[in-house]
Amino acid sequence: MTNKSAEQKPSETALFAALRRAIAYKEYKNEKFGPDHLAEYFLPAHFRFFLRFNKIRANTKNKLARFFPGMNEYMIARTVYFDRLFVEALETKTPQIVLLGAGYDSRAYRFAKLNLDTMIFELDAAPTQNRKKKCLKAARIDIPPQVKFLPVDFNKESLQDVLEKTSYTQEEKTLFVWEGVTYYLDPQSVDATLEFVSLSTKDSSIAFDYMVTLGVENRDQYYGAKEFAQAMQEQHATEELTFSIEEGIVETFLAQRNLTLIEHLSNEEIEQTYLLDAYGALIGQIIGFMRFGVASPTPSATVS
């Protein structure tokens, strides 16, 4: 994170992401809207206790929704979207998965039985990563031998320097998962990460979410934008939002960095793909300025 104080303690936004996933699991308990049955183990004990009660859980969900309209629904969709890509990588025996800013991502543990020989590298700031390992131990969740934890400061350290200390190899097909991270990085760090990925093999890919650039002139165009900006400033001041991409230019943005956009979902496409119930009705509207994308190295820029 850009703020020094944020680097010295576990990420608050990662904790709130886990809280939203835990609430979704308690509410839906299915693979479509609430698949993360391990999310609650990353919450403080008193959180886990109170989430047992329907009324308290509903009140917590509603309070979160008042501060961040559409964020609960966005987290539901985001979890399932990245679940799909993660599982596809395991099922196709992708040699490596790199979690860039892993936070309390539980996929390496939820899908451990699907993992035959894929190496998973979890990268994150040391305080968050250390707390995560303590939570896993307390919950008696085994860490598979394929999982490697690597502490990193994305704004100061290069991926090459961090990964070259491990068994990671740039000549192997890799899925990079960049979930819930880009908006907290400075533009130079984003460029450095994309440059590193662009030099991977041509069948590698990076899956990411990002926010559309917001300003006074366009905030009213996006559901939940004004409330989001205010709540981030008031409640998560140590984790600044420092990166965004102008609406409609992500393909060009990536091409300039030797990456080819192969999948992209707008807010409406996210809703229609991931938030329709069994009757075809939308369970809720997501925050309007977030997008999903997947890109691969442009062949001329790759190592093979």
Image: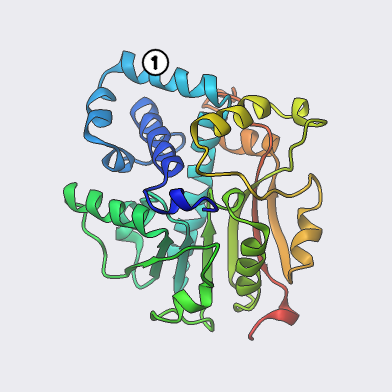
Image coords of residue 151 (percent x, y): 39, 65
Q: Nearer the viewer, residue 204 or 4?
A: 4
Q: Quadrant for residue 144, please give it.
A: bottom left
Q: Nearer the viewer, residue 296 or 219?
A: 219
Q: Quadrant for residue 218, please give it.
A: top right
Q: Residue at x 79, y 44 (%)?
A: 247
Q: Nearer the viewer, residue 298 or 254?
A: 254
* Residue 286 appears anywhere in the view: no
Q: Nearer the viewer, residue 35 or 39?
A: 39
Residue 203 position (above or below residue 5): below
Image coords of residue 154 (percent x, y): 52, 63
Q: Is residue 155 left or right of residue 90?
A: right
Q: Amino acid at mark 1?
A: Asn
**Residue hosting label 1:** 59
Q: Residue at x 55, y 53 (%)?
A: 2
Image coords of residue 36 (percent x, y): 37, 41
Q: Is residue 220 left or right of residue 76?
A: right
Residue 130 position (above or below residue 78): below
Residue 43 position (above or below residue 63): below
| Figure colour scheme | rainbow
State how many labels appear: 1
Q: Residue at x 44, y 49 (%)?
A: 5
Neighbor class of circle 1 (other Cα within 10 Å; few <14, some 14-19, many 20+) is: few
| Residue at the extreme top | 55
Q: Residue at x 61, y 63 (%)?
A: 189
| Residue at the extreme bottom | 304
* Residue 103 appears anywhere in the view: yes
Image coords of residue 141 (percent x, y): 21, 53
Q: Secondary structure at mark 1?
A: helix
Q: Quadrant for residue 268, please give it.
A: top right
Where does the C terminus fall, quadrant-wise?
A: bottom right
